[in-house]
Amino acid sequence: MFDRQALLPQLICAAGLFCAAITPALAQGAPSPQTAPPQIAAPPPPPPTPIPFEDAVLRAANDLLSKAVLPPGPTKVELVIDPLIDGASGSQSSATRLMQERIKDVISASYARFVVQPFSSETLARSPLVLIGTLTAINNAGASDGIRDAYRVCLALADLRSGSIVSKGVARAKPEAIDVTPSPAFADSPVWANDPATNTYIKACQGSKPGDRLDPVYVERIATSAFVSDAILEYDDKRYREALAYYRTALDMPGGDQLRVRSGIYLSNWKLNRRADATEAFGRLVDYSLAGNRLSVRLLFRPGTTKFLDDPEITAPYPMWLSQIATRAMQRDSCIDVVGHTSTTGPVLVNERLSVLRAQFIKDLLQSASPALSGRLTAVGVGSKEAIVGTGRDDASDAIDRRVDFNVRRC
């Protein structure tokens, strides 16, 4: 018999395998090395603590402006603000406009080298710095299906000369005392969609970091955006003729054929009581959206019912809208899913049933307007699963959550 324990070190040495290191340990009968225990991942950092709205705007603005690298010397630097928007709906609101005013106050009080200029084609021709920003309802803990209990303030500073983002500022705000009521041009809009122009703006703010290149599409269309901004301000001030002139000018500019422009042309004509022009403009708006295979219409119902609101000022154009949707849908060799939506308020099952009933109600109205559509329409309800704003306020701020979609598909 031979001792295997004693012979093993000699065999290892004979093979020239780490003799000096292994032999003593084995000779002493030491246990073989064990695999290191797996490391436990560090817990994620806690979410930021939301602070009062105006404090959050101040924090984000100071973060943005203090980090901006400016040319040496006392030379003044021109800055324009491309109107801030809601990061979910793309709308300008009372809150986003208040943000702009507070940012101007911060610049005036603490950043003397910046000179805020009007957002105009004349100023943009001099390639100033452009401040963009969004205000977005979020779940503070990051849960995709969680209650939206905070607002994220996102600001970015873009240099048109270098075509890049040069600074960012972010903060989170408590939802209390934030008035996210859309401005009239957005509250009155009959439709909503993921407009490419708006998406490019949101991406430039929320999907960027300092040093990133600006989307060339944003740069190419920024002069058009200045005319659109003027049109929106004129409409909000009830100067509808001037608004219509700006909208029509923007439509013919690079990238001007966009949802908010077509919507503005319809709205201005409607406010001017030009019914024939308004009807034609709405029809073209429907064509624009259906060409992208989706038309989202703000048809507002009484809570918990399939009846429209008892407000003639809001519902007066509904028959014309539905007639135009039926007519334009007939011109397409396709089928359409009529999809009902609800806000996040109320039980899930109740919302799902209500959304189906509303979709069926609209489907019936369309088929009454155009019987040839029978067999090409399907009523579908998704409840609040596809909420866009998701705050559950059930007012003008989340009206698009109570929309009806017309999704085009092949029959």
Image (cartoon, grey):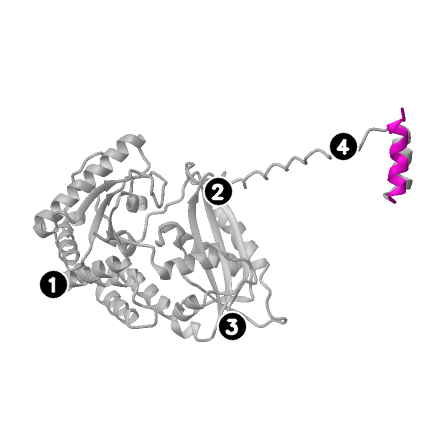
Magenta residues?
Answer: 1-16
Q: Nearer the viewer, mark 4 or mark 1?
A: 4
Res. 237 in view: no
Secondary structure at numbered mark 1: helix
Q: Measured along the vertical axis of the image, is residue 180 above or below residue 265? A: above
Q: Measuring from the top left, give residue 359's x and y in whole percent.
A: 20, 42
- The residue at which mark 2 appears reads as 52
Residue nearer the viewer, 123 or 327 = 327
Would residue 128 be found to the left or right of residue 119 on screen?
right
Q: What is the CA distance from the residue labelled 2 to the residue labelled 4?
A: 54 Å
Secondary structure at numbered mark 4: loop
- The residue at which mark 4 appears reads as 34
Secondary structure at numbered mark 3: loop
Q: Measuring from the top left, give residue 399's x and y in whole percent.
A: 28, 45
In terms of image quadrants, where is residue 212? bottom right
Q: What is the CA distance from the residue labelled 1 to the residue labelled 3?
A: 45 Å
Q: Nearer the viewer, mark 4 or mark 3?
A: 4
Of pointers 3 and 2, the one earlier in the residue sequence: 2
Q: Measuring from the top left, give residue 387's x and y in whole percent.
A: 34, 43
Q: Measured along the vertical axis of the image, is residue 250 above or below residue 288? A: below
Q: Measuring from the top left, give residue 166's x and y in whole percent.
A: 55, 63
- The residue at which mark 3 appears reads as 161
Of pointers 2 and 4, the one earlier in the residue sequence: 4
Secondary structure at numbered mark 2: loop
Q: What is the CA distance from the residue labelled 2 to the residue labelled 1?
A: 48 Å
- The residue at which mark 1 appears reads as 276
Residue 149, label in figure: none
Q: Measured along the vertical axis of the image, is residue 252 above or below residue 345? A: below
Of pointers 2 and 1, the one earlier in the residue sequence: 2
Q: Quadrant of the N terminus?
A: top right
Q: What is the CA distance from the residue labelled 3 to the residue labelled 2?
A: 35 Å
Mark 3, Cα crowd under 10 Å, few <14 / some 14-19 / many 20+, is few
